[in-house]
Amino acid sequence: MSVTITRMRRRHIEAALAIIRAHDKDDAKAAKTYFARKARSRKRWRATSARHYVALDDNMVVGVCGVDKDVEEGVDVWWLGWFYVDASSRGGGVGKALFDRSVRFARKHGARKLFVDTGSGKSYRRARDFYAGQGAVEEGRLRDFYGAGDHMVIYGLALSGK
């Protein structure tokens, strides 16, 4: 497999949403709203406070990942989001390449810390293991966030000594 990581373009949105939808329909709805809002504004699409990437295999989108600066409250804090890899492409380094590209972008733009949230359910075990493998540590849980017994798990990764 020869995968290329590239900046997400408007033409990639539907394919990226299909990958997200295959894993989590609710997340796909939220992602659709997020990407539609961004796509309406050239300024928002090109902003350095957020960047999303896709993994392309033979010009087909096989993964998506991005980062957003916390512009509300965090000081040099960024969030990883919409991080999904097509089931047929998992385990071959696609996720790692997307993650690394997103982290480099955030670091380049002054990120001190990167946070990511995921679920506590069995279907998110691979994501939790991946984040831990990248050096992120569990920093909190919002109990019953997604439903009874389904918690939001928040990981943090220090990116600089600031």
Image (tube, rainbow, N blue to C red):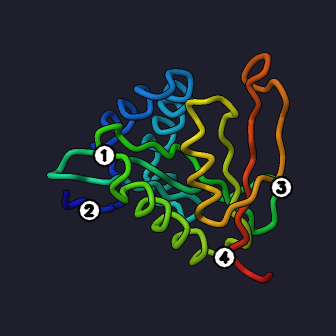
Report the amino acid beneath label 4: Gly
Q: Residue at x 56, y 22 (%)?
A: 26
Which secondary structure lies at badge 1? helix
Pointer 3 and pointer 2: residues touching (CB < 8 Å)?
A: no
Density class for disc 2 (Cα within 10 Å; few <14, some 14-19, many ≥20) is some
Query: 39 or 115: which is nearer to us?
Result: 115
Foreground tag (3 vs 1): 1
Kindly identify the amino acid type of the residue bearing the numbered disc 2.
Answer: Thr
Mark 3 vs mark 2: which is more N-terminal?
Answer: 2
- The image quarter in which residue 97 lies: bottom left
Question: Residue 141: percent from the left, percent from the top?
Answer: 82, 40
As measured in the structure, the alpha-carbon distance from the residue carrying label 3 to the one carrying label 2 is 34 Å
Instruction: Decide if residue 50 is on the left or right side of residue 32.
Output: right
Disc 3 secondary structure class: loop
- According to the image, label 3 marks what residue? 73
Quadrant of the rendering where the C terminus is positioned: bottom right
Q: Residue furthest bottom?
A: 161
Q: Which residue is mark 4?
A: 110
